[in-house]
Image (cartoon, rainbow, N blue to C red):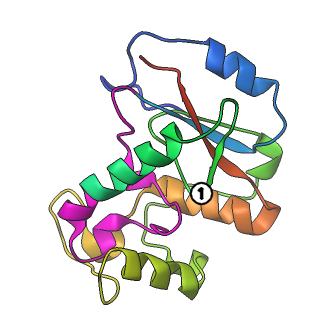
Amino acid sequence: MMDTDNVNCKEVNLEPLKNSLKREDWDGLSFNTSPHYYDIWGLSIWPYCFSYNHFYNNFKYHTIIRNYIMARLTSLKPGQLLPCISSFNGFSIYRTNKFLNAYYDGNVRTDLFPQHLLDAHAAAQQSRGLVYKNYGHIKGRYEDCEHRAFHQMARKINNARIMISPEIVFM
C-alpha cells in the first residue's frame, strides 16, 4: 500500500525493500522516511497507543511523538525492526494471509483497543481521556487513520506482527 503523493514519490532505494522481502520476522512492515518519520497520524506505538489527535495537547505531542519515534528508530541495531501497533508512513508491505480478515476503517475504533492501551496513551500525553474535537481536517468523534483499525484487526484476529524498518525506501 502506498500514498502516491509528493512525500513518497521521490528517489527510490529498493535495497531495503528487497532485503525485507527475504525476512520472516514481520507481517506488516513500513519504512522510515527522510528527513524524518512523518506519518504520526497512522502511528500507534507504546506508550502512544492510539491517535494523538484524540487526546489533549495534540499539537504539542505531534512533535514529541515524532521525536520519540525517530529516537527509537535511530537506536535500533543494524537489521533490527521496531515492533508497533500501527504504522503506515506512506508505504507499507503486507503478508496477505495475516490481513485477509481485516479492513480499512477510518472511524474512531476504540473497541479494537484494550483499555490499558488507551490509558497508557492518555497518561503519556498528560490527558484525562479521549477528546473528540473537530479540527476541520479531522472530524473528531468520527474520524481516525484507517490504517490503525486495519492493523489492530490483523493483530487481534491473526496475531499479525506490525513492524517499522529504520531503513529508508523513499529518499
Rendering quarter of residue 17: top right
Which element type, helix, strand or loop, lies under badge 1? helix
Residue type at mark 1? Answer: Phe
In the rendered view, does 66 fall on the left or right side of 86? left
**x 39%, y 82%: residue:** 123
Is residue 105 part of the magenta span, yes or no? no
Quadrant that contains the C terminus: top left
Which residue is at the far left?
Answer: 136
Between 37 and 109, the residue placed more toward the observer is: 37
Between 101 and 129, the residue placed more toward the observer is: 129
Give the tally of numbered discs.
1
Q: Say which residue label 1 marks.
A: 150
Question: Residue 169: percent from the left, percent from the top?
Answer: 52, 21
Is residue 46 part of the magenta span, yes or no? yes
Quadrant that contains the N terminus: top right
**x 29%, y 83%: residue:** 127
Relative to 127, does residue 5 appear above or below in the rendering? above
Between 125 and 129, the residue placed more toward the observer is: 125
Question: Residue 147: percent from the left, percent from the top?
Answer: 51, 53
Question: Residue 46: percent from the left, percent from the top?
Answer: 53, 66
Relative to 76, does residue 104 appear above or below in the rendering? below
**x 43%, y 75%: residue:** 121
Callout 1: 10 Å neighbours few (<14), some, many (20+)? some
Relative to 12, does residue 3 appear above or below in the rendering? below
Q: Main secondary structure of the magenta part?
A: loop
Question: Residue 57: percent from the left, percent from the top?
Answer: 20, 72
Q: Which residues are magenta?
A: 34-62
**x 44%, y 49%: residue:** 69
